[in-house]
Image (spheres, rainbow, N blue to C red):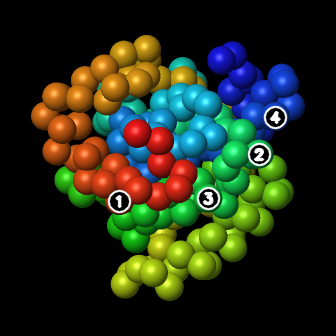
Amino acid sequence: METPKDSPSAPNGKTKVATLGGGCFWCVEAVFERIRGVEAVISGYAGGRVENPTYDAVCTGATGHAEVCQIHFNPEEISFETLLEVFWLTHDPTTLNRQGNDVGTQYRSVIYYHDESQKETAEKSIAKAGGKFENKIVTELAPLPKFYEAEKYHQDYFAKNPDQPYCAVIIPPKLEKIRGMEFFKP
């Protein structure tokens, strides 16, 4: 599906976009591709100082970009609020610039909102989720900066590489956290 990368709505007016970073974008993408109402997930980079960043450059930590996913969803099937519930379940929002063994600013927990409604929903969701974690949530909440789509080989990475060692160890436990929930699609 072709949609404007910076727009909260697709041309048909039904699809909205959420932009979330919760560590490695392979993991975020694998989770949200299994959610009913999600029509597309695009891995990319946002929040840095370098135009047209590459994966190798982002991995140095010098660009300031986070690995993020743009999640195109039908709000008649799933809400932004529910997407955020999935977000909290499938990463640790209390560790600054880190998810497990992945360390660096590119792995930060971030919600880039597309409009004021998303900002308000995210603020409420952060407050609600805060009581579920032992430590304070450090997720960054900011307006959507320019989004750069990641290289083609990063798109649908887990679907194409389920036996890749990192993916085979890290992603299945994330999927188990949401399996059986009403919004999970096998």
Name which of mark 1 and mark 2 comes first in the sequence: 2
Between circles 2 and 3, the one closer to the viewer is 2
Name which of mark 1 and mark 3 comes first in the sequence: 3
Task: Say which residue label 1 marks.
Answer: 177
Q: How far separated are the C-alphas under marks 2 and 3? A: 12 Å
SS type, badge 4 = loop
Task: Say which residue label 3 marks.
Answer: 82
**Which residue corresponds to the image point at 34% horizontal and 26% vertical from the top-left?**
159
SS type, badge 3 = helix
Query: Residue 75, how many percent across, how many down?
Result: 75, 46
Please rate how many residues cluster around mark 1, counting C-alpha atoms within 10 Å: few if below 14, some from 14 to 19, many from 20.
Answer: few
Residue nearest the observer in this picture, 91 or 32: 32
**What numbered label is drawn on residue 14?**
4
Between circles 2 and 4, the one closer to the viewer is 2
Question: What kind of residue is marked 3?
Answer: Thr
Label 2–label 4 contact, CB within 8 A: yes
Q: How far separated are the C-alphas under marks 1 and 3? A: 14 Å
Name which of mark 4 and mark 3 comes first in the sequence: 4
Query: Residue 48, how many percent across, how many down?
Result: 54, 39
The correct choice, above or below, for 85 with respect to 66 in the image is: below
Task: Say which residue label 2 marks.
Answer: 76
Q: How far separated are the C-alphas under marks 1 and 2? A: 24 Å
SS type, badge 2 = loop
Name which of mark 4 and mark 1 comes first in the sequence: 4
